[in-house]
Image: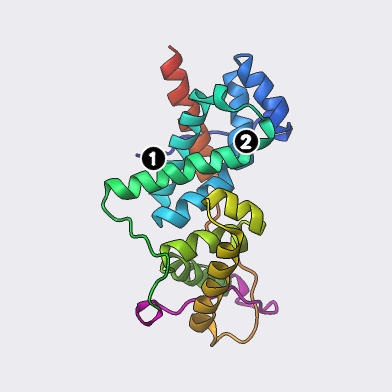
């Protein structure tokens, strides 16, 4: 279970993955923080798109970094690190769902029984913009959570994480054409739920900055240190 502990960014976060991995392989465990801070946001969103729960997604991300550290020798190409971490995250999240008996495969969902959902829209600055942004962000997060499993994962990677079609296909192990189809359908579903909003408003969903990032970094390093002692 996630526990909240204090942590703060270090100088490692500005280094490249290659530079950090060299230090980690040479035995510098503290340098691993840089890897976590580079990839926490994307991995959290991948996990969140599958388990649809913040606390569980954080647990999945922590598990991912512990497993990845213990299997670093399997990573032959540092450039493959983002995709490798994403696959570990996806597998861990799916395993968590299987254990809780909540996994439902929805390759071709029946649209009659699906909630109608859509993409975020934008609105000019107004006095109550902050409050409106927060309300709309919460609404969007709820709508995204209610998307069918297959659509939600694609939407999170394409729309929120801004992954390319090719990267999304690789991470989810599906065809590029399937990514395009699912993303298009997810946007249509979301649009039906948000059609009453005629303007657009800038929102960011499922953020992983601040205490969430610090918590994962601190907890993972503490766990790895305890295993080395």
In the image, is residue 113 above or below residue 14? below
The residue under the point 51% across, 30% down is: 68
Instruction: Inspect this view and state whether residue 209 appears.
Output: no
For residue 154, side relative to residue 55 (left or right): right
The residue sitting at 33% across, 50% down in the picture is 97
In the rendered view, does 202 fall on the left or right side of 85?
Answer: right
**211 in the magenta segment:** no
- Predominant SS along the magenta part: loop
Q: Nearer the viewer, residue 210 or 29?
A: 29
Q: Residue 43, how many percent across, how many down?
A: 54, 46
Q: CA distance from mark 1 to mark 2?
A: 24 Å
Residue in the picture at 40% in, 77% down? 115
**The residue stretch that appears in magenta:** 111-130
For label 1, the residue is 2
Badge 2 element? helix
Foreground tag (1 vs 2):
2
Return the residue at label 2: 81
Label drawn at residue 155 = none
Q: Is residue 1 above or below residue 57?
A: above
Q: Position of residue 136 (x, y in %)?
A: 53, 73
The one of 96 and 77 positioned closer to us in this rendering:
77
Identify the element where label 1 is drawn. Answer: loop
Q: Position of residue 226 (x, y in %)?
A: 42, 18
Quadrant in the picture for the N terminus: top left
The image shows a total of numbered marks equal to 2
Q: Residue 82 appears at what percent x and percent y?
A: 62, 40
Report the residue that reaches farthest toward the top.
229
Sort mark 2 into few (<14), some (14-19) or many (20+) by Cα contacts within 10 Å: some
The answer, for residue 98, to whether it is visible in the render is yes
Q: Residue at 59% of width from left, 73% of height from top?
A: 120
Disc 1 or 2, which lies upstream in sequence?
A: 1
Q: Which of 34/19 is in front? A: 19
């Amino acid at each position: 279970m996630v526990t909240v502990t204090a942590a703060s960014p270090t100088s490692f976060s500005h280094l490249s993955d290659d530079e950090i991995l060299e230090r980690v392989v040479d035995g510098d465990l503290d340098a691993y923080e840089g890897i976590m801070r580079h990839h926490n946001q994307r991995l959290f969103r991948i996990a969140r798109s599958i388990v649809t729960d913040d606390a569980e997604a954080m647990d999945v991300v922590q598990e991912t970094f512990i497993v990845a550290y213990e299997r670093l020798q399997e990573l032959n190409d540092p450039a493959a690190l983002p995709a490798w971490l994403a696959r570990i995250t996806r597998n861990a999240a799916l395993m968590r769902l299987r254990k809780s008996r909540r996994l439902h495969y929805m390759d071709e969902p029946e649209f009659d029984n699906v909630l109608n959902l859509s993409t975020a829209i934008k609105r000019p600055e107004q006095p109550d913009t902050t409050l409106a942004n927060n309300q709309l962000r919460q609404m969007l997060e709820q709508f995204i959570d209610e998307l069918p499993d297959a659509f939600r994962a694609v939407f999170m990677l394409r729309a929120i994480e801004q992954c390319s079609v090719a990267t999304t296909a690789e991470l989810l192990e599906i065809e590029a054409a399937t990514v395009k189809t699912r993303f298009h359908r997810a946007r249509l579903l979301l649009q039906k739920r948000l059609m009453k909003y005629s303007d657009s408003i800038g929102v960011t969903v499922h953020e992983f900055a601040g205490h969430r990032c610090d918590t994962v970094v601190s907890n993972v390093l503490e766990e790895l240190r305890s295993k080395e002692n």
